[in-house]
Image: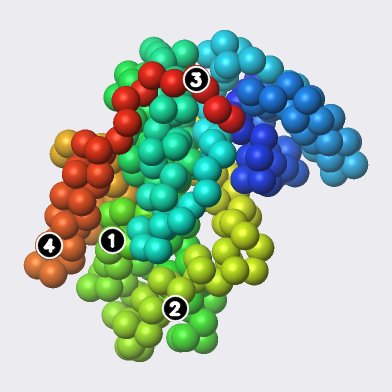
Amino acid sequence: MSGPVVGIVGAGAVGQIVAASLVTAGLPERLLVVSRQPGQVQGLAADLQDLAHTARSRSLVEAGEVADLHGCDAVVIALRTDFKNTAGQDIRRGGAAANAPALGALARELRGYGGTVLVVTNPVDLMARRFAEVSTCSRVFGIGSNLDSARYRLLLARYAHVHPDLVRGHVIGEHGDRAVVCASTTTVGSRPIAIPVRTVVEDLQRRPALIRTGIGRTRCGPAGAVLSTLRKALGLVDGIEELSVRYGDVFLGIPLRFAGGKALPCLPSLTRSERLRLDSAASSLRDAYAHLPAHTERIAT
């Protein structure tokens, strides 16, 4: 039985790390790399071929075109247009106006695609919705809340002095300033948390800035989230991922339980305060989406 074929759109910093992670793990039998810059995509494909050989990976890496993506089982979108993010708050939304037309153009070329699409491009909740609505693809997931959730569990485990696998908890809503920590249903070793959640949340909010200050952009965390999600979305393993999907008339992060590649929402019970924060995030995303530019420009990867 042949393995999955995965395409990745975007050969920049994030796309490179995501692609390298997939090849190192040997997840795709074929990895198709797509970019608007021929020299960049050819160079990345060659570098990844070297990686596959030295790491004894089974993955066959090829440079391709957008049209070739229709033959993939899954497509990862990590494109980013050239822009300077000057936002002082809502940092992840800083590229919305620049990236939305590119996502729309790509979505038109992939209209009717029947595989799984993972959107990494920020602001991920808005970009996942844009891609889903323009492409009419039914399996579009935004990577973001699962990274927030992983960070939350990691930080909480450090405070509790336990292994992260003993922590159960979700961060949902927007991947950004309006993320909602589900503290009421978080457990450590099957027991309710007994440490100050506010301290953990403050550390969680500071973590992206720590990474940006040190290396300029988050790269490795999203790559791990893509790898974990692809394994579940392709039916290789079962489990839960917090992903941005349609929630009413917006896209935002909620937990999804994957079984045999099929995803079912499994939103935990929320307190009134948590529900209000989730509704507030949805309202803010609804307003932000209404102000996105029309998707009429060229693809930029």
Q: In which quarter of the image is the C terminus?
A: top right
131 lies left or right of 38: left
Nearer to us in this view, 11 or 295: 295
- C-alpha gap between disc 2 and disc 1: 15 Å
Residue 91 vertical position relative to residue 66 in the rendered view, above or below: below
Q: Dot 1: within a 10 Å radius of its alpha carbon, few (fewer than 14), some, or many (20 or more) residues? A: some
- Which residue carries the number 3 mark? 298
- The residue sitting at 41% across, 57% down in the picture is 87
- C-alpha gap between disc 1 and disc 4: 11 Å
Q: What element carries label 4?
A: helix
Give the total number of marks visible in the rendering: 4
Residue type at mark 1 is: Arg
- Which residue carries the number 4 mark? 276
84 lies left or right of 39: left
Residue 85 vertical position relative to residue 70 in the rendered view, above or below: below
- The residue sitting at 85% across, 44% down in the picture is 55
- Which residue carries the number 1 mark? 178
Residue 19 vertical position relative to residue 110 in the rendered view, above or below: below
Circle 3 or circle 1, nearest the eye? 3
Q: In which quarter of the image is residue 76?
A: top right
First of labels 4, 3 by sequence position: 4
Are the residues flagged by discs 2 and 3 in contact, CB closer than 8 Å? no
277 lies left or right of 110: left
Q: What element carries label 3?
A: loop
Are the residues flagged by discs 4 and 2 in contact, CB closer than 8 Å? no
Q: Dot 2: within a 10 Å radius of its alpha carbon, few (fewer than 14), some, or many (20 or more) residues? A: some
Q: Dot 4: within a 10 Å radius of its alpha carbon, few (fewer than 14), some, or many (20 or more) residues? A: few
Residue type at mark 3 is: Arg
- Which residue carries the number 2 mark? 203
